[in-house]
């Protein structure tokens, strides 16, 4: 189980599980293959370049990033990719549009900014990070709506600049609206999921529509952001017991759970050994 890069244990159940995996990849509705295990970069700050280099050295080929400088350093991801020597065609690079830039023209402008930061000519996957602004995230109103931005993503996809498109943090109501609005169906839906927050409804919807479900915070970090003093996922007695019985880490257990549910996962760490272990 510790050798989860293969991720070939995807299931075929009725709760959002899928089985269309090929040698550690999920086949998207575009026909492209997306690695089942990618490397997340949220919250790494100045350590981003070093961590991404370690991830690429360990064998990761999918890197998840975003334009939200509050949480991501996409420029440092680009620096690491350039220094790694890994051929561009061997990589699967994801970015996400900050909701402050919702709107057709703003989306096109910011997409180019991501290409510049990442030092590439195209993205394998471009997502709308949120369907709308919330709290103090945007400091003002964007020029348009997520629907306007989706039309821009469809244009980028048609031009071959965004090989696949999708959404992040859309709730089930927004996803249902998207089913009626989209001319090009999303290839990927990224949402928070872990063993205590399984997100079954959205996963079932994704399976029914042929959209790949991608989980973030599979290791439970969102619980800490919600005010928990410890991570209940990695400390869960059942998880710890299974990890001890299998001779693997608790992280390996919960990542295997997600993979067996047909999810793409993007674990994040700044620790070199854990980065390698999570793959």
Image: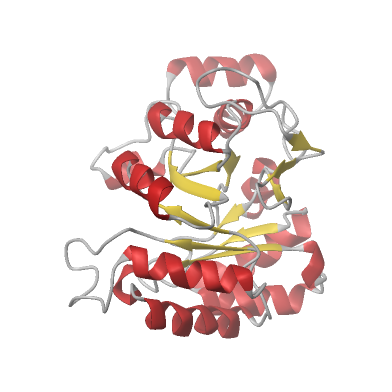
Q: Is residue 225 left or right of residue 116?
A: left
Which quarter of the figure is the C terminus placed in?
A: top right
- Measuring from the top left, give residue 196's x and y in whole percent: 38, 26
Q: Position of residue 180 (x, y in %)?
A: 39, 48
Front residue of 213 and 41? 213
* Quarter of the figure that contains the N terminus: top right
24, above or below 204, in the image: below
The x and y percentages for residue 97 are: 43, 69
Residue found 75% across the figure and 31% down from its top: 8
Residue closer to the observer: 124 or 40? 124
For the question of whether residue 145 can be seen, the reply is yes
Residue at left 45%, top 33%?
205
Residue under the image location 39 percent in, 54 percent down: 181
Q: Residue at x 34, y 64 (%)?
A: 146
- How many marks the image carries: the answer is 0
Residue 77 sits above or below residue 248 on the image:
below
> Where is residue 20, by image quadrant?
top right
Measured as percent of width and height from the top left, residue 52 is found at 64, 64
Q: Quadrant of residue 6?
A: top right
Whether residue 157 is situated above or below residue 245 in the rendered picture: below
């Amino acid at each position: 189980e510790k050798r989860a890069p293969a991720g070939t244990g995807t299931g075929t159940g009725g709760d959002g599980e899928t089985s269309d995996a090929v040698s550690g990849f999920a086949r998207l509705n575009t026909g492209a293959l997306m690695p089942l295990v990618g490397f997340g970069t949220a919250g790494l700050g100045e350590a981003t370049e070093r961590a991404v280099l370690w991830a690429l050295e360990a064998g990761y080929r999918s890197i998840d990033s975003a334009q939200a400088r509050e949480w991501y350093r996409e420029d440092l991801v680009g620096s690491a990719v350039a220094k790694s020597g890994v051929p561009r065609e061997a990589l699967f690079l994801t970015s996400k549009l900050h909701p402050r830039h919702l709107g057709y023209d703003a989306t096109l402008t910011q997409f180019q900014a991501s290409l510049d930061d990442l030092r590439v000519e195209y993205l394998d996957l471009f997502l709308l990070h949120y369907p709308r602004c919330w709290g103090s995230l945007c400091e003002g109103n964007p020029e348009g709506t997520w629907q306007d931005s989706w039309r821009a993503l469809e244009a980028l996809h048609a031009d071959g600049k965004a090989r696949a498109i999708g959404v992040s943090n859309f709730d089930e109501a927004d996803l249902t609206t998207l089913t009626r609005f989209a001319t090009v169906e999303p290839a990927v839906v990224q949402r928070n999921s872990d063993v205590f927050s399984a997100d079954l409804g959205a996963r079932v919807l994704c399976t029914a529509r042929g959209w790949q479900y991608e989980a973030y915070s599979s290791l439970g970090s969102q619980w800490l952001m919600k005010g928990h003093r410890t991570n209940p996922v990695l400390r869960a007695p059942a998880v710890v017991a299974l990890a001890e019985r299998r001779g693997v880490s608790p992280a390996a257990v919960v990542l295997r759970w997600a993979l067996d549910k047909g999810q793409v996962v993007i674990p994040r760490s700044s620790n070199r050994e854990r980065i390698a272990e999570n793959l």
